[in-house]
Amino acid sequence: METTAMDTTAMDTAEAWGGVYAVLDVITKGGLQPHDIIQGAECPAQNFATIHNALRRRMPKWADSRICDLIAKIPSESMSINYNMSDEQQSQWFIGFYHEKSRLSAAESSRVTGGRPTKGSQYAVDWTRVDWSLSNAEISRMFGVTRQVASIQRKRHATAPGE
């Protein structure tokens, strides 16, 4: 069967809706209920409004921003509360859900470790090769350490920020 542009758009729409529900799942204490996920795959706009309104007051800014990015990919006709997904689109919805959950899980892992190596890893910063003309904030982002660590190392190497 040949895929048309319309089919591709429908699949992209389904994946975007799956991503929206993945964000909602992550920010919901204990995750979304299974029936919310199933209903989200069947009629996403209708169930989104209910879940989003319940979470709106305590939604983190990153989640609100990500949901807006994903919704921007969804055509207006797919935003109708009467929009129902076909079985094939529901499959794509779950793929989008899985991909977004994986992306969010990786981002959370990075946030928890601050991009720093975990205990026992072989990665270490060679502080003798650091460009000390950079600010502590720039050094910390570059090497995945805190600003405090960059500041302490700067003191050990006897240069002030911007020197």
Image (cartoon, rainbow, N blue to C red):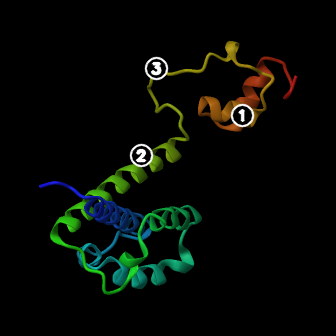
Residue type, mark 2 in image? Ala
* CA separation in Å, label 3 and label 2: 21 Å
Q: Is residue 93 left or right of residue 161?
A: left
Residue 45: quarter of image: bottom left
For residue 122, which numbered disc appears in the image?
A: 3
> Tag 1's secondary structure?
helix
Q: Nearer the viewer, mark 3 or mark 2?
A: 2
- Check the image and report above or below for 121 versus 112: above
* Residue 24, position as x, y percentages in the image: 41, 69
At a point 77% along the width and 27% down the height, the residue shown is 134
Residue 143 point in image, percent of width and height: 61, 29
Q: Residue at x 81, y 23 (%)?
A: 133
Residue 4, quarter of the rendered image = bottom left
At label 3, the amino acid type is: Gln
Q: Is residue 24 above or below residue 15?
A: below
Check disc 2 and report the residue beneath it.
Answer: 106
